């Protein structure tokens, strides 16, 4: 009976926590390139491009693609938002309708960035049509 009780009270040795793996670093940095909050994507992308991390082709690809996609979205959406807003102020109703039609474009760009972050975190290279080809060329330099 004493043997039975001691066998039940013995606990297996606690598993030590696994050391931090650097295998997930490229995926995490790749995903952070696309996070559209508080300029995180810009900061992380520039960090990768301007440091030795640019030697990792996976991270460099996502950094370049994020920068280029953000630039395209900025160049397209900012004039559309301001243009339709100004038309709305000047003309009234029809301009406000146009402004409300442009707002979903920003939401689509936001969802696209989150999708690209998800793909990068999975370790995949999801290439956007034109931007992705240019980003791949820059990453392979």
Image: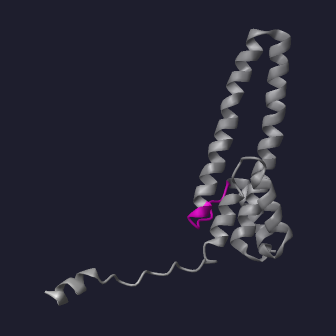
Residue 116 image offset from top left, x and y in percent = 63, 55
**Visual colour scheme:** one colour
In this rendering, position of residue 62 left or right of residue 88: left
In this rendering, position of residue 48 left or right of residue 126: right
Magenta span main SS: loop
**Quadrant that contains the C terminus:** bottom right
Stretch in magenta:
120-128
Residue 75 image offset from top left, x and y in percent = 83, 41
Residue at image coords 86%, 12%: 90
Residue at image coords 79%, 72%: 54
In this rendering, position of residue 50 left or right of residue 77: right
Residue 40 image offset from top left, x and y in percent = 76, 53
108 up-or-down from 115: above or below? above
103 up-or-down from 67: above or below? above
Residue 68 image offset from top left, x and y in percent = 79, 54
Residue at image coords 62%, 60%: 126
Residue, far bottom: 3
**Quadrant that contains the N terminus:** bottom left
3 up-or-down from 138: above or below? below
| Quarter residue 82 falls in | top right
Magenta stretch: includes residue 126: yes
């Amino acid at each position: 009976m004493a043997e039975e009780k001691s066998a039940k009270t013995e606990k297996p040795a606690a598993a030590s926590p696994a050391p931090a793996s650097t295998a997930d670093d490229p995926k995490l940095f790749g995903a952070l390139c696309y996070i559209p909050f508080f300029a995180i994507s810009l900061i992380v992308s520039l960090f990768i491009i301007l440091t030795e991390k640019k030697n990792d082709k996976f991270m460099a690809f996502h950094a370049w693609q994020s920068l280029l996609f953000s630039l395209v979205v900025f160049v397209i959406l900012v004039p559309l938002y301001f243009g339709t807003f100004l038309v709305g102020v000047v003309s009234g109703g029809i301009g406000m309708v146009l402004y409300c039609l442009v707002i979903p474009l920003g939401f689509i760009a936001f969802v696209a960035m989150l999708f690209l972050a998800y793909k990068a975190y999975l370790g995949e290279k999801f290439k956007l049509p034109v931007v992705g080809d240019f980003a791949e060329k820059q990453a392979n330099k």
